[in-house]
Amino acid sequence: MRAIEGSQEKQGVVRLILMSDTHGHHRKVAVPDGDVLIHAGDFTYFNGSTLAIRDFNDWLASLPHRNKLLIPGNHDSGFAYPAWRELITAAALLINEGTTVGQLRIWGAPVTPGDWGAFGAETSYERAELFSRIPSGTDILITHAPPYGILDRASAVDEPQGCDQLRPAISRIKPRVHIFGHVHQGYGMRRLNGTLFVNAALAGASYEIEKKPISIVIRPASQRVLLRGQAADSPWVIASRPSLP
C-alpha cells in the first residue's frame, strides 16, 4: 500500500470532493475546493482518444487539491493496459490497490459487472475473490460499481444494477465511506450500518453533466462524539452531516 503525503489530513478535518462519470465533459464541472479529490471512474466515453485523456489529465493537474485519487470505470477499460496508465500523471490511479492519505486508508477497485474482465474479474467468482483482497479496516472504499441494492437503480421501478459480490465485501470491510458511480440516476447518499454510501455520478441519462460534485467532511474520532452506528474503534467519523449540492 503506497502512501501519499498529507497535510491537514494528518491531524484534523479532511474535506473530500467526490465525483464520477464525467464521460469527457470534465471541463463543464465546477469543482469545489477541498483536501482530497476522488473520481470513481468513467472519465472517458468508451475510452475516448489519447488527446481526450491527455486533456483530462491536464484538467486534473490544474485543480488545486493536494491529493487526487482516480479509478477507471467500465468506459475506461483501456486502462487495463500499463501503457494507458502512463497517460495519467496528475492523480494516483488505483487499480485493485490501496494507498494512504495521512491516516486515511483508501482502496480503489474498478471492477464492474459487464466490463468483460478488463480489470481482472470477468466472472462472479473472480469478482468475489478480488474483493476479498480489500483489507478490513479500510476507511474509504472507491469502486465504480455500486453494491447491489444501494443507489443502483435507474428508476424506482427498475431492477438494481449493483454488484452482488460487492455487498457482502462491504459488510466485512466496514468502510466509513464508500464512493461509486456507474448508475447515473442513482446519484445521492445513504447511510447504512455505519457506512456512508455515495453515488457521485455527475452525468445524466444523456451522458451530459447534470449534477455537481459532492463534498463531505470527516475528522478523527478522538475529536468528536461518535455518530449512531459508528464503530467505537474507528479512527475516523463523519464530522458533519453531508448534503447534496
Image (cartoon, rainbow, N blue to C red):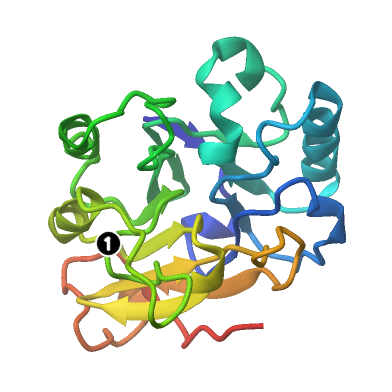
Where residue 133 sits: x, y (%)? Answer: 21, 34
Where residue 105 sits: x, y (%)? Answer: 36, 48
Q: Which of 155/19 is in front? A: 155
Q: Residue at x 48, y 67 (%)?
A: 199
* Count of residue discs: 1
Q: Residue at x 62, y 54 (%)?
A: 21
Q: Which residue is mark 1?
A: 148
Residue at far top of view: 83
Q: Residue at x 76, y 61 (%)?
A: 208
For the C terminus, which image quadrant? bottom right
Q: Residues within 10 Å of mark 1 (few under 14, many from 20)?
A: some
Q: Does the image show residue 71?
A: no
- Establish if 134 lies above or below 120: below
Where residue 32 sits: x, y (%)? Answer: 75, 69
The reply, left or right, for residue 33 in relation to residue 121 is right
The amino acid at mark 1 is Tyr
Query: Residue 176 sits in which quadrant?
Result: bottom left
Give the SS element for disc 1.
loop
For the N terminus, which image quadrant? top left
Query: Residue 149 sits in which quadrant?
Result: bottom left
- Establish if 239 lies above or below 144: below
Query: Residue 34 sits in which quadrant?
Result: bottom right
Q: Residue at x 59, y 83 (%)?
A: 244
The reply, left or right, for residue 32 in relation to residue 194 is right
Residue at far front of view: 157
The reply, left or right, for residue 56 in relation to residue 237 is right
Q: Does the image show residue 40?
A: yes
Where residue 45 sits: x, y (%)? Answer: 70, 41
The reply, left or right, for residue 154 in relation to residue 114 is right
